[in-house]
Every structure is written in C-alpha cells, then in structure tokens.
Amino acid sequence: MIRVILFLIAVAAVAAGFVWFADRPGDVVITWMGYRTETSLMVAALAIAALVLAVMFVWAIIRSILRSPEQVSLFFRHRRAMKGYLAISRGLIAIGAGDMRVARKSADEAARLSPGEPLALLLAAQSAQMAGDRGAAEHAFRAMSTRADTKLLGLRGLYIEAQRRNDGAAARQVAQEALKSQPSLSWAGQAVLDDYCAAADWAGALVALEHMKSGIDKADYRRKRAVLLTARAQALEELDRDSSRAAVLEAVKLAPDLVPAAALAGKRLAENGEMRKAGKILTAAWRANPHPDIAEAYANLRFGDTTRARLTRMQTLAEKTPGQREAALAVAQAALEAQEFATARAALAPYLAAPTQRVATLMAQVEDTEHHDAGRSREWMARAMRASSDPVWTADGVVSDRWLPVSPNGRLDGYEWKLPLAELGFDRPVIEFTEAPAAAPLDMPAETAPAMPAAAAESPPAPEVPRKSAKIAKPKAVEPIIPLVHAPDDPGLDLEPLDSGLDRDPVPEPTTPRSAWQRVLQLFR
C-alpha cells in the first residue's frame, strides 16, 4: 500500500511539472558557429532528455564490449562451480548410501572442479575414511585445519583419526588446540577432561570442567564437579587432610546425594570434632540414598563408643527410612557386633522368606555366634550362594568393591549402586528351589519316616493357594537338536538286563524235532 501511494505521488509530481512548464511558455535560442537555432522550452527539454538517453545507451554498449572477457570468464567459472556443487552433492549422497565407488569418483571430480572448497575437502576426507585410507583422510583434515572457516572441523577429524590409531598424545594435542580456538567447544572440552581423568590429574580436570561450564547443563556441571572434588579429596586423604576436607565439603554442597562424598565428609568432620554437622550431612545423604558406606560412617561418628551405643545410633538412623532393606541390614550388623541377637533376628525377619546374599550371610553369622551351630550356619551360607545378589558398584559391566570416579571405559561418574544383572535386563525375581522331604512308604511307621530339615520346620507355613491358580502346565516335548539315531553299522544298545542272557546260548536250540538234513546244515552254521 505504501508503494502504491509513493508511486501516485511521483506521478502527480511529474504531471505538475509538465503543467508548470506548459503554463510558462518560453523560447530557447542557440547560436553556434554562425548558426542560430530557436525553439520552445518544452522541445529543448525533450531534446536534452533524448540526448542523455542516447549517450547512456552508447556507453552501455561500449562498457559491455570492454567487460566481455570478464563476463565470459565469469560464465565459465559459474558453470564449473555448478558442476563441482553437483559432484559434491552426489558424493555426499553416495557416502550416506554406502556407495564407495561413486563417493570416490565424486570426490575426485569435486577436487578437480572446486579445489580448496570446504565441502570438497570434507567429501575427500569422508570418502577416504569410507575406503579405509587413513592417510588420505588425515591429509584432507590437516588441509581443513589450516583454513579459518574449516579449522574446527579439520581438528575434529584429526582427533578422531588419532583416536583410531590409539595415539593418545596426538589426540590430546589436537583437542587442546581446538579448545584454545573455541573454549566452549564441547567435544574438545570433554576430550581434555577425559584425558585428565585417565591420568588421575583431578586439579587439571577441574580446570577443564570450568572451560566446559558454558556448554553443558547446570545440573550436569554441578554433578561432575562434585565427583571430581570427591576424587581429589580421596587422593589428598593421606597427604593433606585439611585440603581433603575442604574439597569434600564443597562436593557435598554441590551433590548432597553423592554417597562417597557424604561418607568421606562425615569421617573428616568427625575427626575434626564436628559431630553435629557430620550427622546432618550423613542423615541427608541417607534419606536420599541408603547405602552401607553411609551407615558405617554414621555408626563410627564418635570414636571409642561402645557397640551398644553404635547400635542405638543405627536404630535412630534406620527410623528415618522405614521399610528399607539397607536400614535393616545396618541395624542387624550393629546388633551382631553388640551381641544383641534378638534385635538382629528381628531386623532380618521380614527378608528371610526371600533372602539376598547379605541377609543370608548375616543370618549365618548370627547362628554361628549365638548358638555356635555350625550346621545351621552352613545351611544359611549355602542359601547365600543361591540367593539373589545385592546392589554393588557397577559400571560398563564391571563390578567394583568400592566407588571409583572413572569407569573402565573412561566415563566420569560411571559407577552406579545397583544390581549387577540389571544391565543385562534380568528383572525377574530369583526363585530359590528347596527339595521336599521324601514321603514315607505306606508300611513304614510314622516314627521312622525321614525327618524334615530344621530350616523348613521353623519357617512359617506357606499361604494356601486356590486350586484354580495352582494349575501346572504340562511340559512340552522338545525335539532334540541332533536326532538320536543309530549308525548303520551300530547294533545299538541292548535294552535287556545284562544278566538275562548269561546262562543261555546266543542262538537257542529249536525244541521241535529236526530232520537229518537239518542237523547236517546245523554243523556248518
């Protein structure tokens, strides 16, 4: 709408100008070289306008003639660039489709038509990687790293190639160079961080994490920093207790639910006499994640306490997370140390129907310590061998007896407190089969029948199952993988008893009377 209004205003201005000239007629006289030309003002204006247009047209023709070589060169360059663009597009599509022959052919064509183009270099590198030519790929990435517009892409490629040939020093150098060029680059920061973690250089890892702060989530940054501070505190535990305590306290502030940080902070504060602060940290961590390490640190808050005092403290901690198995195990362990066997049995009673390995082991210790009953103790240890596993520190399929800041595959904060079979997808409960006592024969007195095992006699009676839900599926016949057939020259197994044919001849004599001819033939058998 605005353009229409402006156009109408321009037309109106031109019309007003013509009207103004028409209302004010005049003459224009030109005298030049003895000639006198006289005309009106309007005709003179039109003649001047026509002359200007003619001059402009002639100049355009001359200019096009002068620029014709450049235009022809530009046309051919544009045509060559279009061919190179099509070759690059065709090569990238071929790489995505897995067509190595077309990819290499397109890469060569793109290098010939568009040498030095970023996409042409990328196509050459990717096609070389696809063909397994590591030298050509590294050469292309190195050429890209010398350009300002493709430097980071080239460094990324060089880092990947260094990793593939297991050259840690080269990979570290490339990652550091990329990080200097762009501090917020996530892959470079992660590579430098992983390198520091692999070398257990926690101070350098903390510095590398600070460079990554702007490129990662805030919660992820806090968690990683807490893990690194905990690892640093563990490393300084025997060298500098003050620095270790400061580092682990900062880690607890960043991640209060981090078990190793809370346990170590509780120990360091208890050593320094800050019992109340240590109790608060351990209680908060226990509520978030009940763990044996926290229970142990909480039980040993006061040095020199009696075993009964530790039991009382553990019962207080267990009340904060009712119904948790770790709480019951912590109370049972403290009760066992305090010789309070009834308390230990009461704590473990809810878990005896389907005990885990730790529950069964504690019950074996209770039986052995209280009654010195080696038989009952061995029975519980046998059940511990068949029982389901307890949570452990697990990472990348590897089980560790203690927390580690880095997993075997180099992942920071890779260890988790969980069941070791959880990664394999076994989410079904472990069923413990027990042999039923043999039934006594009908003619055997009840007194001489085999006795029921003590564990089965003391266990509570199983709840009655409705008959409709107690249907037992018939086992299906399973075809053998290898057919059990006899070989042609194998006579097979004799299914008769071994002693059934020892007292007779292999070929029985006929009982019916034979003729003389038959008796003669019998001699030649």
Image (tube, rainbow, N blue to C red):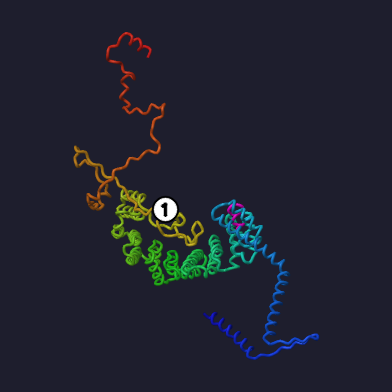
Task: Residue lying at the far right in this picture: please name it.
Answer: 34
On the image, the x and y values in percent for residue 378 come to 33, 49
Please say if 427 is above or below 78.
Answer: above
User: From this viewpoint, is residue 157 visible?
Assistant: yes
- Image check: 144 left or right of 238? right
Disc 1 residue type (three-letter): Leu
Closer to us: 297 or 507 = 507
| Residue 506 pos. (x, y %) | 34, 20
Near mark 1 (Cα within 10 A), the count class, few <14, some 14-19 or many ≥20, is few
Please give the name of the residue rendered at 27% of the width and 15% of the height, measured from the top-left corner.
511
- Relative height, residue 272 to residue 15 (above, below): above
Identify the residue at horizontal 35%, vertical 66% (top origin): 317
Instruction: Please provide percent x and percent y for residue 320.
Output: 33, 67
Region of the chain picked out in magenta, as a range: 123-133
Residue, disc 1: 424
Towards the viewer: 29 or 65: 29
Q: Is residue 141 rendered to the left or right of residue 218? A: right
Q: Where is residue 266 drawn, in percent x and y?
A: 42, 67
